Amino acid sequence: MDAAREARSNDGRSFTVGDAGGTSFVAGSLVIVTGDGERQLALVEDRSDEQPASLRGRLIGVLTDAGLDTARSLPFDTGTLEEVDVATIETLHETTGALLEVGSNLTQPGGPAKLLPHRFNRHTFWCGQSGSGKTYALGVVLEQLIAHTALPVVIFDPNSDFVRLGELNPDATGPTAEALAQRDIRVLRARGEGDSALRARFIDLRLPSKAAVLRLDPVVDRDEYNRLVHLEELMRAGELAQIMPMLRERTQTGDEAHPLAERIENLGVLDWEVWAAGATAVTDVVAERPDATVLDLGGFSTPEQQLVVALSLLDDLWERREERRPVLLVIDEAHNLCSPRLDSPLAVAVRERIVQIAAEGRKFGLWLLLSTQRPSKVHPGIISQCDNLALMKMTSPVDLAELGTYFGYAPTSLLARSPWFRQGEALFAGGFVPTPSLVKMNARLTPEGGSDVGVPLR
């Protein structure tokens, strides 16, 4: 068993070991510190191998006969570090409410890695470069959330990666698989029919959102935008196909509605398949609160229609925010909706709504989980509001430095290991994990919808 003497804590919050030679404790290791008659659980945050080797870390709480008291930690003059045992890890999970088993802890071999379901009431940032296993690993977490919580999940899925969340692999067994089989998981598709169609209603859009659909800027296109403002009542009279004859009729009676009619026709908006007409809209489905709703955004004939779906739903959720009905909004490939570089009126409207939800939505139960390849691809006003981090393989020093700036609660030594992560390995840090942890993700119980295409071999 590893042991390191001469541990010390002056403030009762952090500890140091001046000579850690002969021990194998590394950054991310949970240890038990015994000093001045008390046993405390602690996390090693950094190891320096300059001679003599040294450790530093944080104290998590006092171990008692009743369990783990995370409300207090104590200073000590001289202490001893030893490896944590399985029983203590279980006590940590029980004390913090970590119930969602997503993998195994790489720094405590054989020990499970668990997340805290109740701390998904904070925004989460999920990041990993292409090939890191990011989307597959996200599926593992979503399976756990859907199976073991009553939190409705809405997944913006541009690449059809999660469209099979309602299916189980043939070999899937156990309590999580049994729970998933009972959940109400709906998949809405761009090319779906009936109740499975992914649709939005023009009539339900807010006036600024209607203007964004028509590419109207309140300053650059001030005349047409003003005309739209004065025609707001008409624009609530029906869907676009119903409104067009009314616009033409007003033109014939001398009303200057024809520029709007011409704009609608020239943009081809009438031909978009996204419009619900009399069918069920995405807002209707999500309002029914299924356990999970997958929005399969691929398949629309134009990318603008993906934005219409997103804007329609996000606007509706924001308008209903005072109802305080929790929902987790999972945005895969978040750069499609959250990039600071997007500049079309529709894209800007979607991004600004997400920025608003990131800044103000938490207290209303509107929680985000954003997944992307690089932090630079997501608006900084969104990342800065995230309290949970899941980081997979990331080799870019610039990106890692940026993550260190945003997520100061993630130990620098653990962030620095990201370039050497294997596929399916991740760092979890923040409120949704008991302590910052390096994790090997479990296998999924449901099929991945959009796996990579292999190279044909002879």
Image: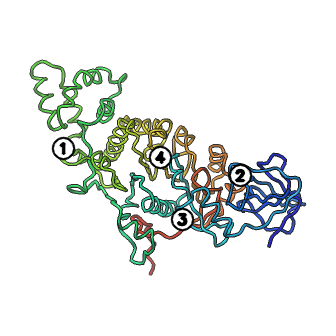
- Whether residues under marks 3 and 4 lie with C-beta atoms below 8 angstroms apart, the answer is no
Spatial separation of the CA atoms under disc 1 and disc 2: 53 Å
> Residue at the location (14% across, 36% down)?
242
Q: Name the element at disc 3.
A: strand
Mark positioned earlier in the residue sequence (3 or 4): 3
Circle 1 crowding by C-alpha within 10 Å: few under 14, some 14–19, many from 20: some
Q: Amino acid at mark 1?
A: Ala
Residue 204's image quarter? top left
> Residue at the location (55% across, 54% down)?
127
Q: Amino acid at mark 2?
A: Thr
Q: Position of residue 221 (x, y in %)?
A: 32, 24
Left or right, residue 401 beside residue 336: right
**Residue 101 bears which disc, if any?**
3
Q: Name the element at disc 4.
A: strand
Mark positioned earlier in the residue sequence (1 or 3): 3
Where does the C terminus fall, quadrant-wise? bottom left
Mark positioned earlier in the residue sequence (1 or 2): 1
Mark positioned earlier in the residue sequence (3 or 2): 3
> Residue at the location (38% across, 71% down)?
168
**Residue 368 bears which disc, if any?**
4
Which residue is identified by label 2? 412
- Whether residues under marks 4 and 1 lie with C-beta atoms below 8 angstroms apart, the answer is no
331, above or below 112, in the image: above
Q: Which residue is more in the foreground, 30 or 39?
A: 39
Q: Position of residue 241 (x, y in %)?
A: 16, 38
Spatial separation of the CA atoms under disc 4 and disc 2: 25 Å
**Residue 277 bears which disc, if any?**
1
